[in-house]
């Protein structure tokens, strides 16, 4: 059986459509399935629509969070509740093409254990959003050592891969990177991002920045290495200025200028403050992990 995990946040306009399209396609392809909608603390009628979809189709299941815990938590909740021999994750807005889901399932039948959907095209986006996305995913790719430029959450995992992900103890999970990190026999399937039929995208530039920072810190120590690099640069600069000062002193031309001293203080102080900020962010993440709070809280199930 194929379990399809579908995170949904304020998607009341799409739940019924998504359930209908996916169930019709999977039944046509003779693929046994279950659809698991995870209502991530929506403020609209998303849960009501999930309940109605369940009343019309017993293969539709629902999980309702007590509040908004984020997409990563919703994905792991769905994977934890899935019962199929394989599980796929896709968006509720149908921007991940259902036909590609069938292609991914056929790859799983051929023996692949992690089938990743990669974006051939990104659909219609503003120039600013496309530029910001490229910059952030470029930074993330270098930080996590995984090509994230075309990556997505649209993946199909064998039960072994799902169980491996669920065994990982960290609270702040990064599904896109972790599903690649676990290994197994992997294959990529290209798809074109479809236009959203209803509702609005939940990803703003601000949320994209927050998402990038959170996942870089949660999955990589690259920012800590930047601190070390900045310290080395300032140290080398100090050596150069120190040699210059000694030469001028020995030749009777002592360095003049209040400006030089102020600039050095500002430069070194800035590096120290940025470094402390980065270290503090890592300490905060360690603090969150040591509390061992659950990734999510489920208030209702159907």
Image (cartoon, rainbow, N blue to C red):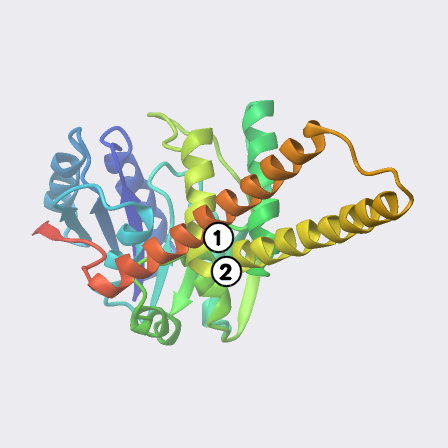
Q: Residue 220 got which mark? A: 2
44 in relation to 59, above or below: above
- 290 on left or right of 130: left
The span from disc 2 to disc 1 (Cα, nearest Å) is 5 Å
Disc 2 packing (10 Å; few <14; some 14–19; many ≥20)? some
Name which residue lies at 63% across and 32% down. 262
Examine the image and state in which quarter residue 269 appears.
top right
- 209 on left or right of 121: left
* Residue 258 x, y percent position in the rendering: 68, 29
17 in relation to 190, above or below: above
Disc 1 packing (10 Å; few <14; some 14–19; many ≥20)? many
For numbered disc 1, what is the local secondary structure?
helix
113 in relation to 139, above or below: below
Name which residue lies at 36% across and 58% down. 173
Question: Can see residue 97?
Answer: no
For numbered disc 2, what is the local secondary structure?
loop
* Residue 279 x, y percent position in the rendering: 44, 54
14 in relation to 219, above or below: above
């Amino acid at each position: 059986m194929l379990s399809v995990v579908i995170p949904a946040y304020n998607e009341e306009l799409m739940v019924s459509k998504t359930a209908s399209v996916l169930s019709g396609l999977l039944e046509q392809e003779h693929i046994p399935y279950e659809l698991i909608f995870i209502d991530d603390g929506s403020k609209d009628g998303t849960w009501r629509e999930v309940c109605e979809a369940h009343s019309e189709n017993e293969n539709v299941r629902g999980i309702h969070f007590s509040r908004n815990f984020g997409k990563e938590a919703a994905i792991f909740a769905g994977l934890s509740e899935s019962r199929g021999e394989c599980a796929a994750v896709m968006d509720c807005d149908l921007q991940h093409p259902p036909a590609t889901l069938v292609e991914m399932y056929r790859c799983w039948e051929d023996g692949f254990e992690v089938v990743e959907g990669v974006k051939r095209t990104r659909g219609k986006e503003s120039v600013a959003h496309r530029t910001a996305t490229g910059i952030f995913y470029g930074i993330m790719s270098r930080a996590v050592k995984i090509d994230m430029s075309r990556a997505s959450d649209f993946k199909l995992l064998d039960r072994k891969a799902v169980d491996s992900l669920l065994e990982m103890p960290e609270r702040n999970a990064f599904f896109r990177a972790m599903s690649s990190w676990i290994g197994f026999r992997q294959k990529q399937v290209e798809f074109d991002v479809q236009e959203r039929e209803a509702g609005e995208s939940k990803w703003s530039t601000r949320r994209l920045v927050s998402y990038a920072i959170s996942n870089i810190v949660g999955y990589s120590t690259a920012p800590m290495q930047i601190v070390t690099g900045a310290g080395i640069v300032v140290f080398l600069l100090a050596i150069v200025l120190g040699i210059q000062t000694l030469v001028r002193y020995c030749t009777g031309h002592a360095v003049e200028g209040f400006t030089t001293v102020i600039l050095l203080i500002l430069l070194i102080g800035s590096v120290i403050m940025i470094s402390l900020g980065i270290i503090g962010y890592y300490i905060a993440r360690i603090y969150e992990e040591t509390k061992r709070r659950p990734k999510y809280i489920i208030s209702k199930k159907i």
